[in-house]
Image (cartoon, grey):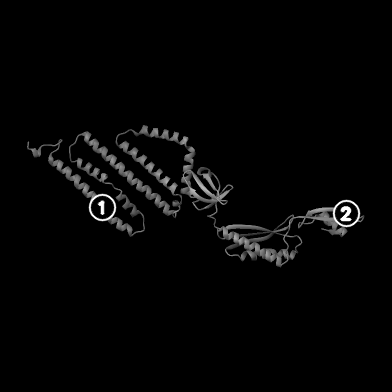
Amino acid sequence: MHLATAPIFGNSPARWLVALTILVVGVALLYVIKRVVVAQLARYADRTATSFDDFAVDMLRRTRFFFVFVLALNVASRSLTVDADVRGWIRTLTVLAVALQALIWGSGLVSFGIERYARRQGGEAGSSATTVAALSYLGRFLLFLIILLVALDNLGVNITALVTGLGVSGIAIALAVQNILGDLFGALSIVLDKPFVVGDSIKVDNFEGTVEHIGLKTTRVRASSGEQIVFSNADLLRSRVRNFKRMVERRVAFTVGVAYETPADTLARIPAMLTEIVRAQPQVRFDRSHLARLGDAALEFDTVYFVTTSDYQLYMNTQQAINLAILRRFRADGIQFAMPGKSVVVVRDGAGGAGTTTGTRGGPANAATAAIAAAVGDVES
């Protein structure tokens, strides 16, 4: 047999040459195609506003050389006659290369999904970057677990017992760290559902302040009085949270008490006065003003209006301007505010004796006292 035609490991030199040619040409061709396609697609992506072409470019750039080489090696080996053990090793190498490349692609897919979600939410997800990063890590972990199980199954490993063991272990771990997991999933709920974001002014039960940080376990709020309040994420979601920053408009109701001695005609004009004062303020929507109650110490006028912005500073400035305007208007018209206090009524009878009756100043006169005062005609207060 001629040396040039002598078989090598069961294959002729010609078959080895064909296999080597397939390997080299395949690697070079795939690599060149990758470079050309990436360059062309990248130039196209720079001219468009969509993100999917950028995602395609990123996926192509994440394609590794080992993946291209193993694919070409697998194709080249099919032109050779090899024993079962070698074929098994090539198959194992191919499965591992595909699994590793899938993990790299999947990591890019997770990153793309989270970034796209953050942009769709107007960048708010960036305000809680720690929790978003945790979401990214969780997605990558689940991806790694799925790819690992698929790879082991393709390698002939019985994964049923492994999955069962992971399930039992997962339950045990979850029971052991249920409080931590509760806070972690609470953080994910805050990021995804967004009841508030960093910078929002919130009130939880009797605590009020500005959100400073949303972490994996706790959320930190800077109270109005200066101290930092730390909430567990799980406890925070179980509470009723009032988000003042998302207030569209602020409803304001206030009461003005007027003395009972005020004439009825003047009382009838007071709602119109209050209406005029409120409507004169900027960014205010007037609702109503009425003589609402005949109170114990005053005739009470209720007025309701809306500040058409959530700005607390504007709300306080508006209320101050209204209060000052009411004071000036009532003094100009001689209207007396009801003053809390006690009145002492002294009634003298014909024998020179005296009796005293006490009542609330500004309130309606007691019927018996009024009758006695009218009969005697000598009332001092």
Q: Nearer the viewer, mark 2 or mark 1?
A: 2
Q: Are marks 2 and 1 in contact (CB under 8 Å)?
A: no
Q: Which residue is mark 1?
A: 35
Which residue shows up at 29% across the image and 40% down it? 96
Mark 2 Cα-neighbour bin, 10 Å: few <14, some 14–19, many ≥20: few
Residue 176, given in percent of the width and then of the height, sits at 47, 35
Residue 138 numbered tag: none
Residue placed under numbered mark 2 in the picture:
354
Return the disc, 2 or 1, that comes first in the chain's sequence: 1
Residue 291 drawn at (x, y percent):
70, 60
What is the crowding at mark 1: few (fewer than 14 residues within 10 Å), some, or many (at least 20)? some
Residue at the extreme front of the image, as rendered: 226
Q: Nearer the viewer, residue 74 or 206?
A: 206
Q: Quadrant of the rendered structure where residue 287 is?
A: bottom right
View extreme (left): residue? 2
Q: CA distance from mark 2 to mark 1?
A: 112 Å
Secondary structure state at the residue bearing disc 1: helix
Q: Amino acid at mark 2?
A: Ala
Q: Residue 37, can we see it?
A: yes
Residue 291 horizontal side relative to residue 126, left or right: right
**In this rendering, is residue 373 above or below 162?**
below
State left or right for residue 185 relative to residue 330: left
- Judge by depth and name the residue closer to the eye, 342 or 192: 342
Q: Amino acid at mark 1?
A: Arg
Identify the residue shown where x is 44% and y is 49%.
Answer: 129
Residue farthest toward the bottom in the current orientation of the protein: 332
Q: Position of residue 239 (x, y in %)?
A: 55, 45
Q: Is 211 in front, or is 274?
A: 211
Q: Is residue 369 above or below residue 175?
A: below
